Image (spheres, rainbow, N blue to C red):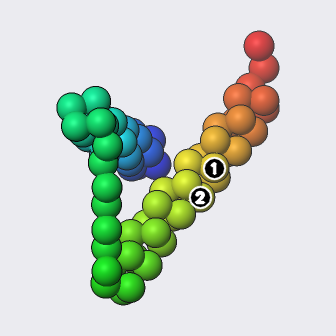
Amino acid sequence: MMNICANALLIAVSSALLWRFSNIWRYGQHIIEEPNLLIRSLETGMIIGILAFGAVKLMRDARANKAKPS
């Protein structure tokens, strides 16, 4: 289940970043504004959560691969 979540989050974050970069390519800039403090805080919290999830998964996978004999 952890791998499915990790892959889904990776696809979602990559898609979001590619959308931003495609706008930069098309228009030369991409400006985002979020005046609502609650929504901005939730968005920031979700990105931090995804980052933490990725870091924890990376550490678990590294430990699991280290424990396996070659």
Residue appearing at x 78%, y 29% in the figure = 66
Q: Secondary structure at mark 2?
A: helix
Q: Identify the residue position indicated by label 2 in the image.
A: 52
Task: Tell me where residue 16 appears, x and y as whole percent.
Answer: 31, 46
Label disc, if present, on residue 55 of the rendered structure? 1
- In this view, the residue farthest toward the left is 26
Which residue is more in the foreground, 53 or 41?
41
Residue drawn at (64%, 52%) of the image: 56
Percent of width and height locating residue 37? 38, 85
Which amino acid type corresponds to the residue marked 2 in the rendered image? Ala
Residue 8 left/right relative to 23: right
Residue density around tag 1, few if under 14, some if 14–19, many if 20 or more, within 10 Å = few
Quarter location, residue 69: top right
Where residue 69 is drawn, which disc sits there? Answer: none
Query: Is 49 situated left or right of 10 in this image?
Result: right
Residue 67 visible in the snapshot: yes
Local packing at callout 2 (Cα closer than 10 Å; few below 14, some 14-19, many 20+) is: few
Which quarter of the figure is the C terminus placed in? top right
> Looking at the picture, how far across and down is residue 52, in whole percent?
59, 58
Identity of the residue drawn at 31% across and 68% down: 33
Q: Is residue 26 left or right of residue 38?
A: left
Marks 1/2 in contact by CB < 8 Å: the verdict is yes
Give the percent coordinates (x, y) of residue 18. 31, 36
Q: Is residue 69 above or below residue 57?
A: above
Q: Is residue 55 left or right of residue 27?
A: right
**Disc 1, SS:** helix
**Separation of disc 1 and disc 2 at Cα?**
5 Å
Amino acid type, mark 1: Ala
